[in-house]
Image: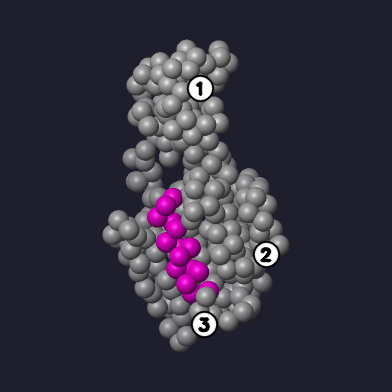
Amino acid sequence: MRIKDIVQHSNAIPRQEALSIIAFALSMTKEETISCWERELARDQTLYIQKLLNERAHGKPFSYITKNKEFFSEQFFVDERVLIPRPETELLVEITIDIINKKADPLYIVDVGTGSGAIGIAIAKKTSHRVFCVDVSWDALCVAKKNAMTHSVTGHTQFVCMDVLEGFKKGKCLDVIVANLPYISSDEWASLMVDVKDFEPSVALQGGVDGIEVYRRLCYLLPYHLKENGYIICEVGGKTHEKKVRELFEATGLTVQTRKDLAGIERALIGTWINS
């Protein structure tokens, strides 16, 4: 079967996605794939491509098919063990790097809910600071370690399995905490898109009945771990969720700023102690 024929018969997904999947399967660029439009493929190549196209048609995310996702202009390995990094989450990295660059060395930085390690690794790579990457999932940490090796930051990243900050000794030693936590409420979960709900790890998405269960656990521990002049940078999921997390932060004693993403949606909260 020709490349042209496969594309024309893959009606279940957008043409550009089909081209991207074919290019991936053949280790070609999309441009090369189009230039080889009339190329006759071997049977095993055709079967492999059709398998991938069928997976995508049934909702499997493109990044899980290719085992790759670009984040902060870097390429990261991803599979079903970790949440796929979102472009809007890059805002957390930008904010964190800006804060780090204004503070003195050395800094104690923690990436809570690291998943693929994209946030922590991007920060370590851009600042050369040591970053502790923590996650409740051992499987996710295996992926994060793989990415740390790929990006040559194993010397200044450390990966620890724990729930939020529960494994750290009390003593207000953390300078910067960056956290991308689960924030999908029970009501929102039911209406999530299939390619998210049925494929991405629920532990990285579900935030309890009201979407802030993990944030509560984090806020409870902040007074024991975050320095007086320290910062916490946290992702939020829009105006309603931002209001809930802001109230939690302020009740903990933090002053809070909100930052919107490029779409104008409340995406990040920056907290620091009132007396800092």
**Residue mark closest to the camera, 1 vs 2:** 1
Q: Quadrant of residue 120?
A: bottom right
Pointer 1 or 2: first along the chain? 1
Pointer 1 or 3: first along the chain? 1
The residue identified by callout 3 is: 229
The residue identified by callout 2 is: 156
Kindly identify the residue that appears in the image at 56 percent across and 65 percent down.
126
**Residue mark closest to the camera, 3 vs 2:** 2
Does 141 sit left or right of 97 as displayed? right
Relative to 63, residue 214 above or below: below
Relative to 245, residue 237 above or below: above
Kindly identify the residue that appears in the image at 48 percent across and 56 percent down.
72
Residue 125 at x, y percent in the picture = 59, 62
Q: Is residue 98 magenta?
A: yes
Outermost residue, front side: 35
For marks 1 and 3, give the CA distance: 54 Å
Circle 2 — which element? Answer: helix
Circle 1 — which element? Answer: helix
Residue 100 at x, y percent in the picture = 53, 74
Does 99 sit left or right of 137 as displayed? left
The kind of residue on which mark 1 rests is: Ile
The kind of residue on which mark 2 rests is: His
Kindly identify the residue that appears in the image at 45 percent across and 65 percent down.
94
| Stretch of the chain drawn in magenta | 86-100
Residue 199 in view, yes or no: no
